[in-house]
Amino acid sequence: MMNNNIITIHDKQFKPLLSEQEINEKICAIADQINALHLEHPLCLSVLNGAYMFTAELCKHLHNFPVISFIKVASYEGTHSSGNVTELLGLNEDLHGKTIIIIEDIIDTGTTIESIYSKCIEQGAKTVYIATLVYKPQAYKGNAPIHFIGFSIPNDFVVGYGMDYNGIGRNLKEIYVLHTN
Ligand code: IMP
Ligand code: MG
């Protein structure tokens, strides 16, 4: 059941956008699409911090024993992209010849995903797929192909299901959007 509760995080109010059930059903549907590809031990490369919850739920539904690994980058300041991607925790894995699924919480301008995608290609990955729970098509300026998209949303700031506003909100099992009036 969707609740109608407005929540307050720091100085801003957020209203419910996507319910726990909608999110879980969508993640199962993405897992089905990935399973249909019959990839052999794909490397699921999860982008911390935001993608931790999506990664956990998605990987529970994947067949064929994926390898799961994490990288950590930062590009956001408050509610806007800074335009720069800082790598906070690098990649240990050898990517050469690997089939990779980059797992993101949300793709906005595309700065983050472009940088990770090119790094995978440069390091000799065989195939690179991108899966994101949320996508903002009006904001995306990247060229990297996005293969699996949970929800396309307008260009508004959201929190929950891994996504934060200045550090808070990641634990929410629903997704909320900035309340403007
Ligand atoms: P991009 O580099 O502009 O595509 O932004 C991607 C990263 O910024 C995401 O992985 C998130 O961590 C963060 N981000 C983008 N949009 C939002 C949002 O609406 N809420 C919370 N975090 C966001
Ligand atoms: Mg992210």
Image: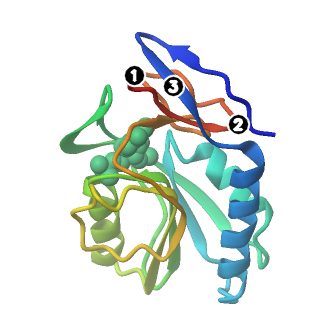
- Its colouring scheme is rainbow
The type of residue carrying mark 1 is Asn
Task: From the top left corner, tell me how far across and down residue 153 is, in percent.
Answer: 45, 54
Between 123 and 179, the one nearer to me in the picture: 179
Q: How far apart are marks 1 and 3 (CA)?
A: 10 Å
Q: Mark 2 points at which residue?
A: 173
The type of residue carrying mark 3 is Phe
From where the camera sits, is residue 21 visible? yes
Q: Residue 14 carries which label?
A: 3
Q: Distance between the residues labelled 2 and 3?
A: 14 Å
Task: From the top left corner, tell me how far across and down residue 140 is, in percent.
Answer: 28, 60
The reply to whether dot 1 and dot 3 touch (C-beta < 8 Å) is no
Q: Name the residue under label 1.
A: 181
Task: From the top left corner, tell me how far across and down residue 94 is, in percent.
Answer: 46, 70
The quadrant the N terminus occupies is top right
* Nearest to N terminus: mark 1 or mark 2: 2
The type of residue carrying mark 2 is Lys
The residue depicted at 63 percent of the width and 60 percent of the height is 68
Q: From this view, report whether residue 59 is shown above or below residue 8.
A: below
The residue depicted at 67 percent of the width and 38 percent of the height is 174
- Point out the frontmost of discs 1 and 3: 1
Q: CB at mark 2 closer than 8 A to ligand 1?
A: no
Say whether residue 19 is left or right of residue 97.
Answer: right
- What secondary structure is found at the residue carrying circle 1? loop
The quadrant the C terminus occupies is top left
